[in-house]
Amino acid sequence: MKQMKSYSLSEMKDKYIGKPGTAERDKYEYELRMDVLGRMIKQARQERNLTQEQLGQLVGVQKSQISKLESSTNSATIDTIIKVFRALKAEINFNVRLEEQFVKLA
């Protein structure tokens, strides 16, 4: 019986999406982070027992914009995302790494 070779997730991403630092890989990683951010917004909203419409009222946007944020934050401004998390009374932190050093933003 022939043994099947196994690959790590990292090896599969390198092969099918591109190596880290390539445009394709950067786009994939960015979209993945935006997807996670949208799911975090939805989870926080649900934990606060708010509807999309109620959260929209707190932030000053329409329900449809909250829906779009939860499904994909790609088109959202950072200002809108911050307003949403503040309305949810959620603490947010951003980390920026410049050449292996983290820059903390409050």
Image: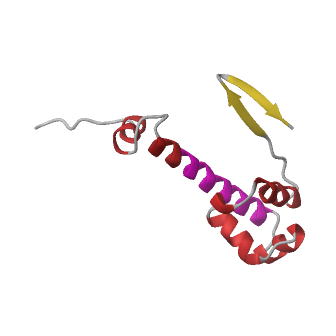
User: What quarter of the picture does the C terminus occupy?
Assistant: top right
Q: Would you say residue 100 sits in the magenta stretch?
A: no
Q: Residue at x 47, y 34 (%)?
A: 20
The residue most toward the top is: 100
Residue 19 position by quadrant: top left
Please state the horizontal and vertical placement of residue 61, each as a whole percent of the image. 82, 72
Q: Residue at x 67, y 65 (%)?
A: 70
In this picture the colour scheme is secondary structure
Closest to the observer, 88 or 63: 63
- Picture layout, residue 35 above or below residue 93: below
Name the side, left or right, on which 87 lies relative to 20: right
Q: Most prominent secondary structure in the magenta stretch?
A: helix
Please state the horizontal and vertical placement of residue 45, each as a whole percent of the image. 77, 64
Range of residues picked out in magenta: 29-47
User: What quarter of the picture does the N terminus occupy?
Assistant: top left
The residue most toward the front is: 23
Please state the horizontal and vertical placement of residue 8, each as a whole percent of the image. 38, 35
Name the side, left or right, on which 43 lies relative to 85: left
Q: Residue at x 34, y 39 (%)?
A: 15
Residue 38 position by quadrant: bottom right
